[in-house]
Amino acid sequence: MGIWNSSVSETQIKFKNRLWLYIIAMIILFLLIVPSLVVIPMSFSDSQYLEFPPESYSTRWYENYFYSIDWLQATWTSVKVGVLTIFLATPLGIMAAYGLVNSNAKIRSILFPIMISPMMVPVILVAIGLFYFYVQFNMVNSILGLVLGHSLIAMPLVLIIVLSALSNYDMNQEKVARSLGASRLRAFFEITLPQIKFSIVSASLISFLTSFDEVIISLFVSGGDNSTITRSMFLALRDQIDPTIAAISTILIIISSVFLILTQTFGSPKD
Amino acid sequence: MKSDALNISIKDITKTYGEFFALKDVSLEVKSGEFLTLLGPSGSGKTTLLMVLAGFTRPDYGSVKFGTEEVVLKPPHLRDIGMVFQNYALFPHMNVEQNVGYPQKLRGVSKEKIKETVDEALKTVKLDGLGHRGVAELSGGQRQRVALARAIVFQPKILLMDEPLSALDKKLREEMQIELRQLHDSLNMTTVYVTHDQKEALTMSDRIAVINDGRLMQLDTPSAIYKKPNNAFIADFIGESSLLSVKVSKKNVYLGNTKILVEHSVKKDGDFLLVVRPEKLFLISDNLTDCNTFTGNVVESIYQGESQLLMIKLDPDSHGDQILRMRIPNGTASLQELPSIGNKITVGLKKSDSFLVE
Amino acid sequence: MTSTQRINQEGINKTELDQLDRKERYTLFGLTVPYLALVFGLIIIPIGWLFYMSFIGRDETLSLENYQRIWNSKAYLRIFKTTFQISLLTTLFCVLFGYPLTYFMSQLSNRWANICMIGVLIPFWTSLLVRTYAWLVLLQKKGLINTLAVDWGLWAEPIKFVHNTSGTLIGMVHIMLPFLILPLYANMRTIDKDCLKAAANLGATPTRAFWTVFFPLSLPGLFAGLLIVFVLCLGFYVTPALLGGGKVIMVAMKISDNIELYYSWGAASALGVVLLGVTMIILFIASKLVSIDQLGNRS
């Protein structure tokens, strides 16, 4: 099994000569993946302190989490906001992508940078801007405020994913459908949409994760009963280190992994 | 599968993109049941005109009538036309049957009727029995046929095709040209066909509309277009030709200082071009009547399979300094007769094959 | 006759056609309106307001006092210095770690490269807080790293890595690395391997072929990646706030403190405007180097 691309064998140095590169690459990959996983054994520690490796094991931190109304409520808020973000960011992103693809180059070159500006502006500024805005409209600590804020930063991701899907899609198919008697709307739903559905699934999952993992906006505009799990975690980590966080982190790793696997499985066409 | 064809009248269609005229006051009439080809180089506006007929490009102004009905303001899906695109644009998430049945589904036709018409359409394009294939399993030629079946399944009165054969290899393309033409004859639809391939246009069409720079240059039968192009662009674009600069003064035509006989004299004085089809030239030894003669040196002799192409540099004193191309079919002239490079030769051109364009 | 004259004369159905054209354009534009409304309402207007606030002094009048304070105060200048230092060092380490790994991945067959790519994407999609917490656990005095190092005799006494600059740097490099790798990898994959072959055929040694052919061709991707990392670092908040333990103060944290602790919108806004200005300048340079949609942001 040729691990090296055989077409470049002339310049490829054989395995032995490049052993150092293998070793360096493996070390870096190890450093990328493994540190996050340390929280998993930590979460089963019996100790109050952050000892590693733990001296004895228990599930007390999970019990702590599942018996804590505050943590469960925060988790529920995050899930709710994440799901609502999917339903706001994904359709808006798809509509904007379709409008952009079908308008002329000049309009596109003006609108596109505006549309991805939420990715460009430092999040802290987005957060304090939203905070100010929500204070005026009494929307601080509201679910709606969180969903709007999270949609704002998820939409550019949806836009980019759907734009790239549409750029690989042959718009002539929609034209054919229209020449055959389908209205533009119907052609979009029956011909275009089924062919970019994988990207839309990816975009939805990524919207959820973006919202679910978001810290800074949540820190500023959520609170009280509608505190998100990330906000509660951040505050817990800043103030005192409670091993319950390890249990929650493990749960979050599992959720992220599940979503990543879902994206890989359903977000790309099988062939 | 017969339907009543419709004639198409296009009047004063103009389309601009900023300062650029994609179409400039194009008017033409497509007769009912006719196979009309829009022929032109890329960027000439031929595809734009087809898109205007289909409704995907909205002209700045002008009228398009299908029969007596004005359609220029109608959206594409209400025009009831069959259309075949260059890259077929089959729907990959549907199989052959679903692709072909799609226009019928849109028209609310019953399931049984859809099945029936789809089978008939597939039979027409010689794909019977392939209904359950996926689009990816088809060859290029089969995809072409599916696209065609999809465009004719609802018996539209007008069929539009945008370079449908350009993705096929040469042999298949030539087969399909004949097949498409036969199909047209059996279906009795008005067909508007876009191509940049002059040979394809000459083979298939009842009439050809040559488009260049957004303008209709000439609309005529293939043979008329070939034999009597009405301007230098068409003479150059259709078939092979050498265009020699000539001067007309008092109805007499001069190439350098040699008088040239032409079939149709021109009334105007000034600079014209003499169109010389390379295959109409012949080798001669003495002067003939009713025939133009040119003398010059062979500067290039190229073997091209069925024929030999000679480039003749005309005698600068009598004809002016110009290059004439001549084609001699291989096999008609014996090898000894074939002039070689450097030879001085005299060639003739019948008066009836000599004509001028501006 | 000029073209416009002609159009006006011939405009039998020009008005209707124009109307249809406009209707179609407006419908398509209409699809982008909800999106644009959110962006305008929740980003552009609030930031415009921040811009305005940054010019309002303590006595509620227009003044430059907020900017003067940034310029004159040693504390603020130190914050900017820290921010740039941390950002530069993080970027530097990301390049040192990221380039060899990406180069390695770019030379693999698609299958193996995709497997390695999952290794890059897993941390990318793991919650920022989880990763920061993990480093908190690993780097503390009784953490795994100190335990192992002392056991193996690398250093005698446990070293305090957290709640200082080194901890912040380690955490940030870990979090930023995927942002360097992704655009760099996209770029390296497009480098034509025939170029390398040609160089080899012309007698270049592999090392020479790398430095004279591959490396220069990978520079656009490298610049894109490091500019993204640098820009994200400038506005970074979570990791320095947690791993720095209050000792490493970066601009974003100061903005947050100004609002949360002192409710001082003017000072926060001025800092924000400076941060935004620097970010935009760098992104502008980046957009000249690479296509704009490669510039992602997840902090």
Image: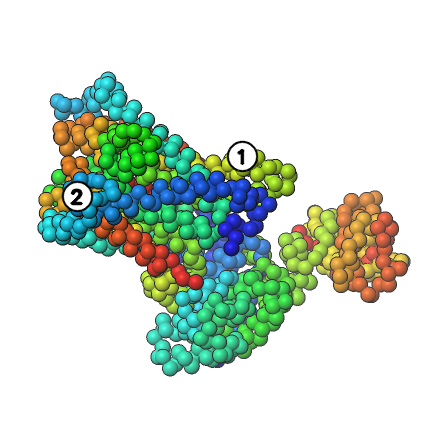
State whether residue A88 appears in this view: no
* Picture residue at 70% right of the left edge, 50% below the top: B272
Count of residue discs: 2
Q: Is residue B178 above or below residue C29?
A: below
* Picture residue at 28% right of the left edge, 36% below the top: C147
Q: Provide residue B137's location: percent of width, then percent of height.
A: 49, 69
Q: Provide residue B220's location: percent of width, then percent of height.
A: 60, 64
Q: Is residue B235 left or right of residue B261?
A: left
Q: Viewer-proximal residue, B186 or B236?
A: B186
Q: Is residue C67 above or below residue A142?
A: above
State whether residue A82 appears in this view: yes
Q: Viewer-proximal residue, C122 or A123?
A: C122
Q: Viewer-proximal residue, A53 or B336?
A: A53
Q: Which residue is mark 1?
A: C211
Instruction: Place residue B354 in its image quadrant.
Output: bottom right
* Picture residue at 56% right of the left edge, 71% below the top: B180
User: Helix or strand or loop: what does disc 2 sit on?
Assistant: loop
Q: Viewer-proximal residue, B314 or A102?
A: A102
Instruction: Place residue A28 in its image quadrant.
Output: top left
Given the image, what chain letter belongs to the residue carrying mark 2?
A: A
* Picture residue at 38% right of the left edge, 33% below the top: C93
As shown in the figure, which amino acid type bears the numbered disc 1? Trp
Classify mark 2: residues with Cα within 10 Å, few (<14), some (14-19) or many (20+).
some
Q: Provide residue B158's location: percent of width, then percent of height.
A: 47, 70
Q: Which residue is mark 2?
A: A47
Residues at marks 1 and 2, CA–CA distance in whole angstroms = 52 Å
Q: Is residue B355 left or right of residue B48?
A: right
User: Helix or strand or loop: what does disc 1 sit on?
Assistant: helix
Given the image, what chain letter belongs to the residue carrying mark 1?
A: C
